[in-house]
Amino acid sequence: MKKVVLLALGFAALGIGGIGIFIPLLPTTPFVICAAACFSIAHPGLYRKLEKSRYFGEYIRNYREKTGISRRARVGGLAFLWITLGISAIVFRRPLVWIILAVVGAAVSVHILMLRASSKS
């Protein structure tokens, strides 16, 4: 039963993390790391597959090895964040929404910039 629950939690976390790639207000990394932790206990094969994943593998390796965030990931994350926030601001033409998007964007940007830089950057 424990394995079934961990697999369900792992897949749910991975799904939310995957959605977070496209929605800047939803963090990807914590959900992917949660999924990896669940899979490492319930199904090591899924953990290895996730760790080798083109999209999520870097998050897991950086967390496990405590290597920090690469320059490419930092620049890409910031660019994607502000592009999607800009699109959201165009779609929702309300000043209150613009303020909320700007505050969230600034907070997430500060967080990304404060993350330890990878020595490989």
Image: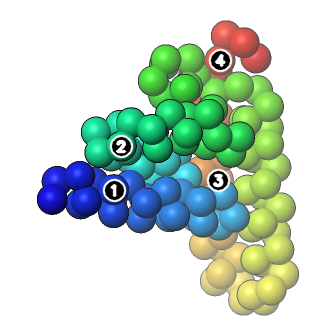
Tag 4 secondary structure:
loop
Which amino acid type is marked by label 4?
Ser
Frontmost of labels 3 and 2 is: 2
Frontmost of labels 4 and 1 is: 1
Along the viewing direction, whichever of 93 and 8 lies nearer the viewer: 8
Along the viewing direction, whichever of 25 and 54 lies nearer the viewer: 54
| Image disc number at residue 118 | 4
Q: Report how far apart the C-alphas of labels 4 and 3 lie in the structure.
A: 22 Å
Seen at 33% across and 63% down, the residue is: 8
The residue sitting at the left extreme is 1
Along the viewing direction, whichever of 79 and 44 lies nearer the viewer: 44
The picture quadrant where one finds residue 64 is top left
Q: Report how far apart the C-alphas of labels 2 and 4 lie in the structure.
A: 29 Å
Q: Earlier in the sequence, mark 4 or mark 3?
A: 3
| Image disc number at residue 106 | 3
Which amino acid type is marked by label 3?
Ala
| Image disc number at residue 7 | 1
Residue bearing mark 2: 43
Seen at 45% across and 38% down, the residue is: 45
Image coords of residue 15 (percent x, y): 51, 64
* Lateral position of residue 83 relative to residue 51, left or right: right
